[in-house]
Structure formats: C-alpha cells, structure tokens
Image: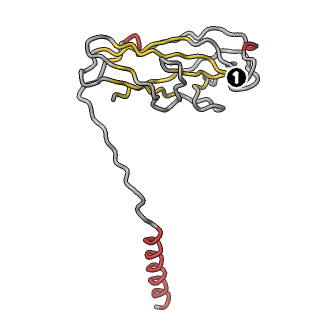
Amino acid sequence: MKKNLIAVVVAAISAVSASNAMATAGTVNFTGIILDAACTVDVASQNQTVPLGSYNKSEFTAQGAVTAAKQFSIVLKNCPEALTQAHVRFDGQPDLTDSTLLAIDNVSGSATGVAINLMSADKLQLPMHGENGYSYALSSTVDNTLDFYAQYKSTALTVTAGPANASTTFSVVYN
C-alpha cells in the first residue's frame, strides 16, 4: 500500500513539474496553395547534360578556385496566367566539405577536392537543397527560359585528376 501511495505521489509531482516546464512561446502558421495546373517543363529541359569542360588540376591554384561558368537553361511552357514568378530548387548529393556545392559522384577514380557550384541567372550561388532567392518572371503567352550557370569549384588545396561528374534534380516553386 505504501509503495502504491508513493508511486501516486511521484506521478502527481511529475505531472505538475512537467506542466510547469512547458509554456507557449508563439505560433507558427503555414500557408500555401495547391495549384490546379502548373507550367510544363519542356522535354529538352527534363533530362539534360551540361558539359563543364576539361581542366588541368593545376588550374585550381587555391581552395575556392573556380572554372569558367557554363550556362544551361530550364524552359517552362504553357504557364497559367495566375503564375507570374518561379524559383528553382536543386537537390542532389551535397559536397562533404561545402554543403552548398554539388558533390562529384563518388566512384572509383573520380576527381577529388572539387565540386560543382550552381548559380542563378545573375551568377549568385544557389545552395543545394534550398529554394534560391532569385525569382524568374513567368509569362503565359511565351515559353519561359530560366537561365542558370554551373562551374567547378575547388574544395581543397589539392585537386586530383579524374572524371568530375554529378547529377541533380530540380523542382519549380511558384509564387
């Protein structure tokens, strides 16, 4: 009987202590829209290859050294009139040294000490796994070409030679 009484008292004290430890600090409201229709991604944009070029490892003279930026585009067609702006999000394997960069495929013989830097039309870095701040204007009357750039960027003092390939997926976020 004493053990049961002690257990009840301990449980009551724990419940009172737990309720005193929690307090409402604020509210988070979520908003959004489920679209009836979105733009169509042009077939040529869905699965494309962007040749970044061939570079000698000696061209990466310091950590953070970059190659020439190569342009690529994603074309959106048949956009509804209600959609006037879009952002693009890139997802893929982030580099272990700099998670804002796209990692080179981890296969035997691949280059090391280098990753891929993705950039918006104004050549500002686009972080992996994040919606970028660059807004692309959309038109319902023409095809919309969203320009991007990619370049190699060294992530270490020493870059080793080998294939430097990677893949990313993209999502279009409408405003």
Q: Secondary structure at mark 1?
A: loop
Quadrant location, the C terminus: top left
- Pointer 1: what residue? 112
**Along the viewing direction, whichever of 12 and 88 lies nearer the viewer:** 88
**Along the viewing direction, whichever of 159 and 127 lies nearer the viewer:** 127
Q: Position of residue 57 (x, y in %)?
A: 73, 14
Q: Amino acid at mark 1?
A: Thr
Q: Is residue 123 left or right of residue 106?
A: left
What residue do we see at 49% from left, 91% from top? 2
Q: Position of residue 102 (x, y in %)?
A: 57, 25
**Along the viewing direction, whichever of 46 and 106 lies nearer the viewer:** 46
**Residue 157 location, quadrant:** top right
In this picture, is 30 found above or below 35?
below
Characterize the local packing of mark 1: few (<14), some (14-19) or many (20 or more) Cα atoms within 10 angstroms.
many
Q: Position of residue 54 (x, y in %)?
A: 65, 8
**Along the viewing direction, whichever of 57 and 21 lies nearer the viewer:** 21
What residue do we see at 56% from left, 9% from top? 51
What residue do we see at 53% from left, 29% from top? 127
